């Protein structure tokens, strides 16, 4: 999910992950933020598919492949 699009041709994507704790069994939610190269034109809240690529800049190692779900 796109959380920021304030830069030119760059979006910040939040990657959500849920798993069960190995000892206690409780569902734990984690999220990471990565910067992705955006040629498609995403908006905040869009669900996107990203792909790992060679380094584009100091922090960008991902690029947006397509928009799965557009925010209304």
Image: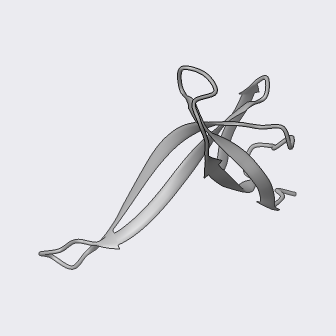
Quarter in which the C terminus is drawn: bottom right
* Residue 17 higher or lower than 31, as above or below: below
The location of residue 11, given as percent across then percent down, is 69, 35
Viewer-closest of 1 and 51: 51
Viewer-closest of 26 and 35: 35
Judge from the rendering whether residue 17 lies leftward or rightward of residue 20; answer left or right: right
The location of residue 40, given as percent across then percent down, is 86, 43
Identity of the residue drawn at 63% across and 51% down: 51
Judge from the rendering whether residue 58 lies leftward or rightward of residue 47; answer left or right: left
The answer to which quarter of the image holds residue 35 is top right
Identity of the residue drawn at 39% across and 56% down: 30
The answer to which quarter of the image holds residue 7 is top right
The location of residue 22, given as percent across then percent down, is 17, 74
Viewer-closest of 2 and 49: 49
- Pick out the residue farthest to the bottom: 25
The location of residue 12, given as percent across then percent down, is 63, 37
């Amino acid at each position: 999910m796109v959380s920021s699009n304030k830069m030119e041709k760059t979006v910040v994507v939040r990657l959500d992950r849920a798993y069960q704790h190995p000892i206690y069994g409780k569902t734990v939610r984690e999220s990471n933020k990565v910067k992705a190269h955006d040629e498609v034109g995403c908006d905040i809240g869009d669900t996107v598919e990203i792909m790992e690529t060679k380094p584009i800049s100091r922090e960008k190692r991902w690029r947006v492949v397509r928009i799965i779900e557009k925010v209304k």
